[in-house]
Amino acid sequence: MPRVRALVAVVLVALALSGCASLTERAGLPPSVDRAAQLESGGDSGGAARVYEQLAGQNTGADRNEFLLHAARDYLAANRPEDAARVLTLTAGALSVPQASERALLNVQLALERNRRAEAAREFAAIGEPAGGPLRDYYHELKARLAQQTPANQAAPPGGHAAPPGEPAAHVALLLPVSGRAAAAAASVRDGFMTAYYQAPANERPHVRIYDTGTLSIAEALKQAHEQGAEFIVGPLTREDVTAAAEYAGARAPMLALNYLPTDHPVPADLYQFALSPEDEARLAAHRVLDDHHKRGVAIVPAGDWGARVLAAFKQELTAGGGELLASAQIDAARTDFSPAVIEVLRINESAARWKRLESVLGTKLQFEPRRRADIEFIFSPAQAATERLLRPQLRFHYAGDIPTYATSDAFDPDLRANDDLEGLMFPDMPWILGGDFADAVRAAAREAWPNGSPYRGRLFAFGFDAFRLAQALPRHGAAGSVGLEGLTGRLSLDSDRHIRRELNWAQVHNGELRLLAAPAP
């Protein structure tokens, strides 16, 4: 074991000086890197790991991954395998060949530190021998350590049983596109998932294995997960991948898909569906409109598939409840002037036309102030935050600022200071954004568990957090349909179609700040 740690230190120094071109090309190492090296030389591997983790939060791409690998090495050297596991899950995007080899070797050592020899042996068998240098020495030291340990040293995974040598290990498979176009979204989901994992009692944590659907097809990922012993699957993330998973004909474990299938697509019996669905929020908005005793109104939505789906869901729910959508208009989110659509849906042009006709009849100039149609009781204006901040002032300019206006949570960005422009807007949102005892407790714990500069913990972080808790609850209670959780994304329950439903609270922007709205009176 001391030899492995010594080699890790050698790898640390060698890769810091030569393995990352973007670092060595700089005029000199930043003082914080010097500080980490000083801590290492003084024997404080844990302190060095924290410095490298902070550096990772301040960088992107290859540099970020390199600092995370540094942190994982030092956490292992400090006998802190859970912290090493945490930072290894943060590596994302394309890794260089040395970085990919090192991450794989670190995962082998991590499995050995956790007394999971069979898992370590399987992962080691998939690693090619590095061509030379410190990584090659590290590879052979781990190989020797594997040969020295017997299968009896492998501990049973928490809540489960030890797997015989060479047998698949029971685990939860997390299918996410951690590389590729959706990598940023996947990283937020993964970070939330792993945060929930580490906040669970140690004896209730399942083994988790991540399958990168950015490099694997869905069929390949499901096949590997089955062969490696997955007892439950969380993912995939995108709508297209969820459709592919539903159509997979091979054997697989029950699955919690992180998106919805198309409404007309057959749903396998062992597939649950969980999504941050704007259509669901549009239906909630329709209910809120009716609960606020409004019946007749108009909608302004972004052009394209997203706007069409959200509008259809809102209109269907509104009509079913006895309301009426008088008119709707589309806006081009790529533009900044939405006046034509606003004027059309508010019928301001008709007011101007009446004024022109009256002037013509009387043969004189009249003082005129345009008026909007008088039969509108509400406006539904779902859009992304940047678009909503442009649209709301234009509605006020066109004499509609006093009309109750509803949106979905996409309209509000909690990290922006420009939400004054949303004055008066009402929308549903999750406890992670609006606050609450559970959300506040998780936020406090996350501040302690994650370094400064860690990835943005937005709605997808909360989504990943709840996905882990559902992965624990569904195998126990899903068949009975009795799942109920207070989550970061809402109050979660399972309906008869195996959809996870979210109950949300409502808020209104008031003086640039959020004000919680009371539930409507019965």
Image: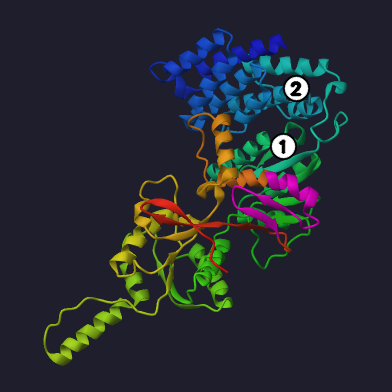
**Looking at the picture, does residue 117 appear above or below residue 255?**
above
Q: Residue at x 59, y 9 (%)?
A: 43
Q: Is residue 172 above or below residue 260?
A: above
Q: Position of residue 240 (x, y in %)?
A: 62, 56
User: Does the magenta-highlighted stretch encompass residue 497?
Assistant: no
Furthest residue to the front? 521
Closer to the camera, 350 or 419? 419
* Residue 220 falls left or right of residue 357: right
Local secondary structure at mark 2: helix
Please name whichever residue, 433 or 55, is drawn nearer the observer in this view of the structure: 433
- Report the side of 77 relative to 353 (left or right): right
What amino acid type is highlighted by mark number 1? Val
Q: Quadrant of residue 144?
A: top right
Lower position in the chain sequence, tag 1 or tag 2: 2
Residue type, mark 2 in image = Leu
User: Is residue 253 at least partly visible in the picture?
Assistant: no
Depth check: give the residue in front, 409 or 329: 409
Q: Quadrant of residue 465?
A: top right
Q: Which mark is residue 354?
A: none
Residue 65 placed where, x, y %?
54, 29
Residue 72: percent from the left, percent from the top?
61, 23
Q: Residue at x 70, y 18 (%)?
A: 139
**Region in magenta:** 469-494
Above/below status of 225 relative to 140: below
Outermost top residue: 42
Residue under label 2, please give it. Answer: 112
Q: Is residue 65 left or right of residue 340?
A: right
Task: Residue 288: tell me if it is visible.
Answer: yes
Q: Which mark is residue 208?
A: 1
Disc 1 from disc 2: Cα separation: 15 Å
Give the quarter of the image for residue 504.
bottom right
